[in-house]
Amino acid sequence: MHSLEISTRGQRLYEITSAVSEWVRQQRMQTGLLTLFCRHTSASLLIQENADPTVRSDIEAYFDRIAPEGGPYRHDSEGSDDMPAHLKTALTQVQLSIPVIEGGLALGTWQGIYLFEHRVRPHRREIVLHLIGE
């Protein structure tokens, strides 16, 4: 098991594919299953296109429209982005499973792994990596 710390600087998608791939290669496992788990309730994980940056900006804009800041929320103890961050996490996921084949992640050509930060202020996010196989 391994823990990956990501420093964020506000709301957006942070690609973590390289860091995750490097850790998997270091384990020297040929076949297996990698589980990633985000230990937060206001950030999430996505596998998404990593070629065209407009995909990421459109995703971010979409989530801002469906869970806007300043909405009629009762929970706002940490600011106006607090409840929208929880809603965005609920609509995405905090856990991913990715097969490992021939020592590498079995991602498609245009797929990347992202931490989706839903809070405005900077945070240190922890992603737990667990690899099983042979």
Image (cartoon, rainbow, N blue to C red):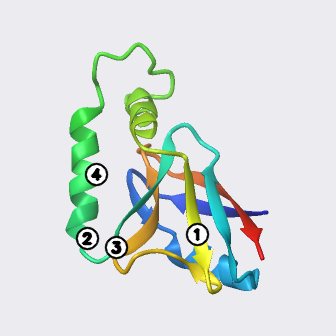
* Callout 3 amino acid: Asn
Q: Which element is circle 4 on? A: helix
| Residue visible at 40% across and 31% down in the picture | 87
Q: Which residue is mark 3?
A: 50
Q: CA distance from mark 2 to mark 3?
A: 7 Å
- What is the x, y in percent for residue 22? 63, 82
Q: Residues within 10 Å of mark 3 (few under 14, many from 20)?
A: some
Q: In this rendering, which labeled residue sits more in front, label 3 or label 4? A: 3
Q: CA distance from mark 4 to mark 2?
A: 11 Å
Query: Which one is earlier in the sequence, the residue at label 1 or at label 2?
Result: 2
Does residue 126 appear anywhere in the picture? Answer: no
Q: Which residue is mark 4?
A: 60
* Callout 1 amino acid: Pro
Query: Which one is earlier in the sequence, the residue at label 1 or at label 3?
Result: 3
Q: CA distance from mark 1 to mark 4?
A: 27 Å
> Residue 53 shows which numbered tag?
2
Q: Which residue is mark 1?
A: 99
